[in-house]
């Protein structure tokens, strides 16, 4: 599935199963909540926090997909073509960071 197809698929799902989009402010709050769920899994799986019994059945892939879904909702609501936005963003990063990361001592092999 391409990013454009994902935007169309989410839009169709919202208009049929979801009835309508939540407003942008509600979706921003939902996005924050979903990112928090990803952070919780990462901090326990890769960080130093231990899992609670209620965390054990959480799935990182599913939580990342929740984040992506809400990002796509926000893009659809605000008229952002995510394919175009990502292409432009990568161009910006490439111009800005071409030498920056190569010169970063922290990134060099030890």
Image (tube, helix red, strand yellow):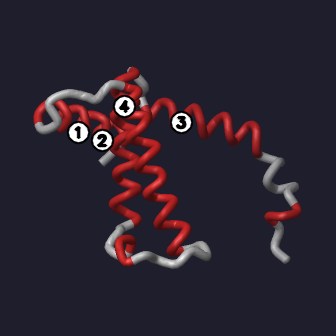
Residue under label 2: 6
Up-down: is 29 above or below 49? above
In the image, which disc is placed on residue 26?
A: 4
Residue under label 3: 87
Residue sitting at 19 percent across and 27 percent down?
A: 20
State which mark lies toward you, 3 or 1. 1
Query: For numbered disc 4, what is the local secondary structure?
Result: helix
The image position of residue 13, as x and y in percent, is 18, 38
The image position of residue 35, as x and y in percent, is 47, 50
Which sits earlier in the primary sequence, circle 2 or circle 3?
A: 2
Distance CA(mark 3)–CA(mark 4): 27 Å
Distance CA(mark 3)–CA(mark 1): 20 Å
Tell me the quarter of the picture where residue 31 sits.
top left
Distance CA(mark 2)–CA(mark 1): 5 Å
Residue sitting at 51 percent across and 75 percent down?
A: 45
Query: For numbered disc 2, what is the local secondary structure?
Result: helix
Query: For numbered disc 3, what is the local secondary structure?
Result: helix
From the viewer's perspective, is 103 left or right of 87?
right
Which sits earlier in the primary sequence, circle 1 or circle 4?
A: 1
**How dense is the environment of label 2, judged by Cα within 10 Å: few (below 14), some, or many (20 and up)?**
some
- In which quadrant of the rendered image does the C terminus lie? bottom right
Residue under label 1: 9
State which mark lies toward you, 3 or 4. 4
From the viewer's perspective, is 6 left or right of 25?
left
**How dense is the environment of label 3, judged by Cα within 10 Å: few (below 14), some, or many (20 and up)?**
few
Up-down: is 35 above or below 11? below
Query: For numbered disc 1, what is the local secondary structure?
Result: helix
Distance CA(mark 1)–CA(mark 4): 21 Å
Do the residues bearing badges 2 and 1 touch, measured as CB atoms within 8 Å? yes
Tell me the quarter of the picture where residue 81 sits.
top left
Q: Nearer the viewer, residue 41 or 13?
A: 41
């Amino acid at each position: 599935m391409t990013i454009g197809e994902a935007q169309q698929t989410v839009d169709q799902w919202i208009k049929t199963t979801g009835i309508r989009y939540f407003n942008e402010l509600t979706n921003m709050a939902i996005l924050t909540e979903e990112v928090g769920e990803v952070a919780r899994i990462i901090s326990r799986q890769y960080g130093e926090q231990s899992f609670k019994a209620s965390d054990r059945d959480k799935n990182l892939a599913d939580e990342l997909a929740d984040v992506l879904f809400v990002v796509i909702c926000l893009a659809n609501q605000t008229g952002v073509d995510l394919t175009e936005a990502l292409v432009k963003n990568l161009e910006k990063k490439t111009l800005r960071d071409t030498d920056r990361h190569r010169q970063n001592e922290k990134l060099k092999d030890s």
